[in-house]
Image (cartoon, grey):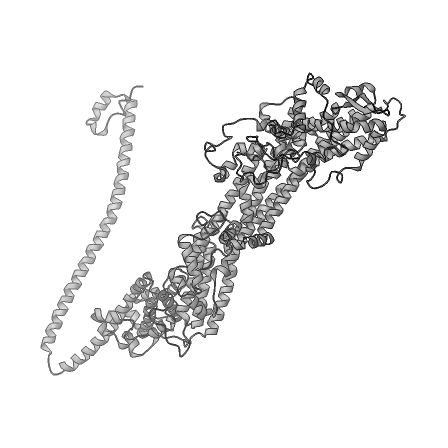
């Protein structure tokens, strides 16, 4: 759109209106007219504004010029009058000049006196504020009281009718000064009382602030003491209510202790006066009675006090000060009441009441502060900071004497105020941490049990995955034992002797395998031990530091701490305290917490065992039962820090006993056996609880195992059909015997006797041996294995006893024949010989045998012809002994080691060239290899007497024909070697004892 030419035209360009009519049309000319008229109105408005503003300035300038004219005229008139006055004075000098000069001099002196007082009155407020800024409240108070004295001297107070005094009328500037001075008194009082709350304030400043308050308020020394203690109590409350994000808790507690100690020191320095007749303290001792000495210096009217008057410095510096009257220059403040010294009884009772009140507040406040401390390390840091504070020279040198003079008793700050609070917080922290460890351990236990049960169910259902190795190891420890890993042996295991091996070697994978400690057990125990180690390390900060090379939980303090504590015990008057008096209580708290933690774990284990041990336990749940059994069995060994937490200082207390003479060794051993500390008794009781829980779990497993195996055994034993009985039959042996007939001739007869037990008996023993070895039988506790074998034997005897109760004429039941009775008698005696082989040494087997065994044997022998029984007894015993020896290798742990091996006590320390690997303490698993021939052979009659209760006599040697026939039978070599071992008098390298021992 094109721009309008009429609007773009400027007014200054319009020269001739006629040209516009020639160039533009009518509409454009009208627009130009409107534009010109608008600009004219705008210029008029600007002109009006400019004239109005300039008019005001013009009026002001005119007024100023008028005032200047009047002022100059008055100055000219004054100069003219002065000239005339001087001229008249020159003309009027005569005889009356001396009198007028005297009057004029007196008038000038009065004028200068009042002027100097007014000048001093005008300068005092500035000096008061300067003194207050420098925290010199006594000087500010003296100046304020001088100011009040000047007010009364100059009569500056308002008259009764509300009119000002003549001075105020002549000097109006003093009105504002009088109003300003009225606020000084309240300000001095407020700042003085706030000064009393400070911790880092000198004794002189405290005394001067109290004197200032006494001068302003007119109070007594007892009221000053009350004000001082109230201010310090308010300061304690302020410290206790300080926000947590400001200073740390350690700084707050140290500030509280410092404030408490400083208060008593300053109370002694300010208010205490020695009894009459006692000398004043020497220069090196603490000063006392500062309040009364300052009061005497400030308010006394003696000549010595006058030398320390308020305006002493000003009179020597200012020239106008000589005009001040003596009432001003020698001004001394005065007390309204007489300042009587505080009696010692009153001072003691007041301080005792204040300490009692502050003790409640401090205990409540510090207790709430310590809630935020979550570790014993933090508590120890606060305690050590308090100890360092109280052990400083500025406090420890005079603390006991100050307390004795003020309170007439010692005041142990730590013992009375903080020790109980710290001990309670320590016990609470220990309890909370122990409960946390207990809860996490129980959670880990339940999680492990659930995982093992789930893995066992998956394995039983055939859907096992690769992640179920932990559950498989719990049931089948053999898979864990024979699995190889890189960490089975440490890299230095080949050249480190057994005596020099430490905890690291004992915790190697091979050592864990020899003890049948599965990864699940190791993981749980390592987790628990790590948590207990953290608690033990945290506890070390609160106990004395360990002596180098000591294994005890607490030993001697080190470096400066030991020297300080020894200095403490030597100097009974020192203010520092013994930081480690709570060590027994601290260790007891940890001991109780750890014991409660273990008992909580045991209660959880017992609840899991009660849930896993119904009348008919599920075999799939036995993995968790075995896990808990091994866990309780090995917790004391795999968690060494648990023992350290329970025993505490026991190792350290046993160390000095090593240097006793040899003559007192036996007496010391007897005394050590009789004297058992409570910690050792608690540790022994805890291990007993763990062992009982482990035995209970093993009992569940053994009960389930024996029930399953003996049910199968009972089913086969009570078979009623001839076919089922024949399927259980095994090898019988034909023997030729020679008997003497009535005519004296020798008669050869042939008999058949069993040489092997029935298949279901062999299956029972073999499956039992497999199951025992599957769960790590070499590491099973001896009582558990004995209970398992005894339970199997009892149930087997019960099945045999049930068989005797069955009637002989039962329909459909195969009758009892002599051959079957012989086989059952052989089975029963073999079972009894094998399962009862672990009886205690020194006791006869007859005294431990079940009466049912003899009843069943008598019942079975009733089915055998008496003449045949007499003939069969000897070879039957021989077959029984031979079978026991042959199967001892196969059955392994079931037959025990008491019969094959002599005692190995002291074998490690003997001089025989044996290299023994001690795998487990409960079983002798491997016999010694016969590197050299032994001249002493163990007789076989003694150990074998308990194997065959009905053995009558040793079997005769077989004939040459029988030996020739047996040489072609399978297994003849083994029989020949066995016969050679039994009958040959010459020693042989091939011994069944070491062979069976190697197989175990």
Is residue 888 visible in the rendered image? The answer is no
* Residue 800 x %, y %: 80, 30
Among the 4 quarters of the image, the one containing residue 324: bottom left
Q: In this view, does 917 lie to the left or right of 946?
A: left
198 or 102: nearer the viewer: 198
Q: Which residue lies furthest to the front in this view?
A: 744
Q: In which quarter of the image is residue 290?
A: bottom left
State the image coordinates of residue 738 (x, y, percent, origin top left).
79, 23
Question: Residue at left 43%, top 59%?
Answer: 566
Q: Is residue 812 left or right of residue 303?
A: right
On the image, the x and y values in percent for residue 616 come to: 74, 32
Point out residue 848 in the picture as x, y percentages from the top left corner. 75, 39
Work out whether 49 lies above or below 370: above
Asked whether 149 or 212 is in front, the reply is: 212
Q: Image point 29% across, 32% down: which residue?
A: 38
Outermost residue, top direction? 968
User: Could you tell whether 260 is left or right of 298 in the image?
Assistant: right
Q: Between residue 259 and residue 796, name the one nearer to us.
A: 796
| Number of disc labels | 0
Quadrant position of the C terminus in the picture: top right
Location of the N terminus (image quadrant): top left
In the rendered image, the vertical position of residue 698 relative to residue 301, given as above or below: above
């Amino acid at each position: 759109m094109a721009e309008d030419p009429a609007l773009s035209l400027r007014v200054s360009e319009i020269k001739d209106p006629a040209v516009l009519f020639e160039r533009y049309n009518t509409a454009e000319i009208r627009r130009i007219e409107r534009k010109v008229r608008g600009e004219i109105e705008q210029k008029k408005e600007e002109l009006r504004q400019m004239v109005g503003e300039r008019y005001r300035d013009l009026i002001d300038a005119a007024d100023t010029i008028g005032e200047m004219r009047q002022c100059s005229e008055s100055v000219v008139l004054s100069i003219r009058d002065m000239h005339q006055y001087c001229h008249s004075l020159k003309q009027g000098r005569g005889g009356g000049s001396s009198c007028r000069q005297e009057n004029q001099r007196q008038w000038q002196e009065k004028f200068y006196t009042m002027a100097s007082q007014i000048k001093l009155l005008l300068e005092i407020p500035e000096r008061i504020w300067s003194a207050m800024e420098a925290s010199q409240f006594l000087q500010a108070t003296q100046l304020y009281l001088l100011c009040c004295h000047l007010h009364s001297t100059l009569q500056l107070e308002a008259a009764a009718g509300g009119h000002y005094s003549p001075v105020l009328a002549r000097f109006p500037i003093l009105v504002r000064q009088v109003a300003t001075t009225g606020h000084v008194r309240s300000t001095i009082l407020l700042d003085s009382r706030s000064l009393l709350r400070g911790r880092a304030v000198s004794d002189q400043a405290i005394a001067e602030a109290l004197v200032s308050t006494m001068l302003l308020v007119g109070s007594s020394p007892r009221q000053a003491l009350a004000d001082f203690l109230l201010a310090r109590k308010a300061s304690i409350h302020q410290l206790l209510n300080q926000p947590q994000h400001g200073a740390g808790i350690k700084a707050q507690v140290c500030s509280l202790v410092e404030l408490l100690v400083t208060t008593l020191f300053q109370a002694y320095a300010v208010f205490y006066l020695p009894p009459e007749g006692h000398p004043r303290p020497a220069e090196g001792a603490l000063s006392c009675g500062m309040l009364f000495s300052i009061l005497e210096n400030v308010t006394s009217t003696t000549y010595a006090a006058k030398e320390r008057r308020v305006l002493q410095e000003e009179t020597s510096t200012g020239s106008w000060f000589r005009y001040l009257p003596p009432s001003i220059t020698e001004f001394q403040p005065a007390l309204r009441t007489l300042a009587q010294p505080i009696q010692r009884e009153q001072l003691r009772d007041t301080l005792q009441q204040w300490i009692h009140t502050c003790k409640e507040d401090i205990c409540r406040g510090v207790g709430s502060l310590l809630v935020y401390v979550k570790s014993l390390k933090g508590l120890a840091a606060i305690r050590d900071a308090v100890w360092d504070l109280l052990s400083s020279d500025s406090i420890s040198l005079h603390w006991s004497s100050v307390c004795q003079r003020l309170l007439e008793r010692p005041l142990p700050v730590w013992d009375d105020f903080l020790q109980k609070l710290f001990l309670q917080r320590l016990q609470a922290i220990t309890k909370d941490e122990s409960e946390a460890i207990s809860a996490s351990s129980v959670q880990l236990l339940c999680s492990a049990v659930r995982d093992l049960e789930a893995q066992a169910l998956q394995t039983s259902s055939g859907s096992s995955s690769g992640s179920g190795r932990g559950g498989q190891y719990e049931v089948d420890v053999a898979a864990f034992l024979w699995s190889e890993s890189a960490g089975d042996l440490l890299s230095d295991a080949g050249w480190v002797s057994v005596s020099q091996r430490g905890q690291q070697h004992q915790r190697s994978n091979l050592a864990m395998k020899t003890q049948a400690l599965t990864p699940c057990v190791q993981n749980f125990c390592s987790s628990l031990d790590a948590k207990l180690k953290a608690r033990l390390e945290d506890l070390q900060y609160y106990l004395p530091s360990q002596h180098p090379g000591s294994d005890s939980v607490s030993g001697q303090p080190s470096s400066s701490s030991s020297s300080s504590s020894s200095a403490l015990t030597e100097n009974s008057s020192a203010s520092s305290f013994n930081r480690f008096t709570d060590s027994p209580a601290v260790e007891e708290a940890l001991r109780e917490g750890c014991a409660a933690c273990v008992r909580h774990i045991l209660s959880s284990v017992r609840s899991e065992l009660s849930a896993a041990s119904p009348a008919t336990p599920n075999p799939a749940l036995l993995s968790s039962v075995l896990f808990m059994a091994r866990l309780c069995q090995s917790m004391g060994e795999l968690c060494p820090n648990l023992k350290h937490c329970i025993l505490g200082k026991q190792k350290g207390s046993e160390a000095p006993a090593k240097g006793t003479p040899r003559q007192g060794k036996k007496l010391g051993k007897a005394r050590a056996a009789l004297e058992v500390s409570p910690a050792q008794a608690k540790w022994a009781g805890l291990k007993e609880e763990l062992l009982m829980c482990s035995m209970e779990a093993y009992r569940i497993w053994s009960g389930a195992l024996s029930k399953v195996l003996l049910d199968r055994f009972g089913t086969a034993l009570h078979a009623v059909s001839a076919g089922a009985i024949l399927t259980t039959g095994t090898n019988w042996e034909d023997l030729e015997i020679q008997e003497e007939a009535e005519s004296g001739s020798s008669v050869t007869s042939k008999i058949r006797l069993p040489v092997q037990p029935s298949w279901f008996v062999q299956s029972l023993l073999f499956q039992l041996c497999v199951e025992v070895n599957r769960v790590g039988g070499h590491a099973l506790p001896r009582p558990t294995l004995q209970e398992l074998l005894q339970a199997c034997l009892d149930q087997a005897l019960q099945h045999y006893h049930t068989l005797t109760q069955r009637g002989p004429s039962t329909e459909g039941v195969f009758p009892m024949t002599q051959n079957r009775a012989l086989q059952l008698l052989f089975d029963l005696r073999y079972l009894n010989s094998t399962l009862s082989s672990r009886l205690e040494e020194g006791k006869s087997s007859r005294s431990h045998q079940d009466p049912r065994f003899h009843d069943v044997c008598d019942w079975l022998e009733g089915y055998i012809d008496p003449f045949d029984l007499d003939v069969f007894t000897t070879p039957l015993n021989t077959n029984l002994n031979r079978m026991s020896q042959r199967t001892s290798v196969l059955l392994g742990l079931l037959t025990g080691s008491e019969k094959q091996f002599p005692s190995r006590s002291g074998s490690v320390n003997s001089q025989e060239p044996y290299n023994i690997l001690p795998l487990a303490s409960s079983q002798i698993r491997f016999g010694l290899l016969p590197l050299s021939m032994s001249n002493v052979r163990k007789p076989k009659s003694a150990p074998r007497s308990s194997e065959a209760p009905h053995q009558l006599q040793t079997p005769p040697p077989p004939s040459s024909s029988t030996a020739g026939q047996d040489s072609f039978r399978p297994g003849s070599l083994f029989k020949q070697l066995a016969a050679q071992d039994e009958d040959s008098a010459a020693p042989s390298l091939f011994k069944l004892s070491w062979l069976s021992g190697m197989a175990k």
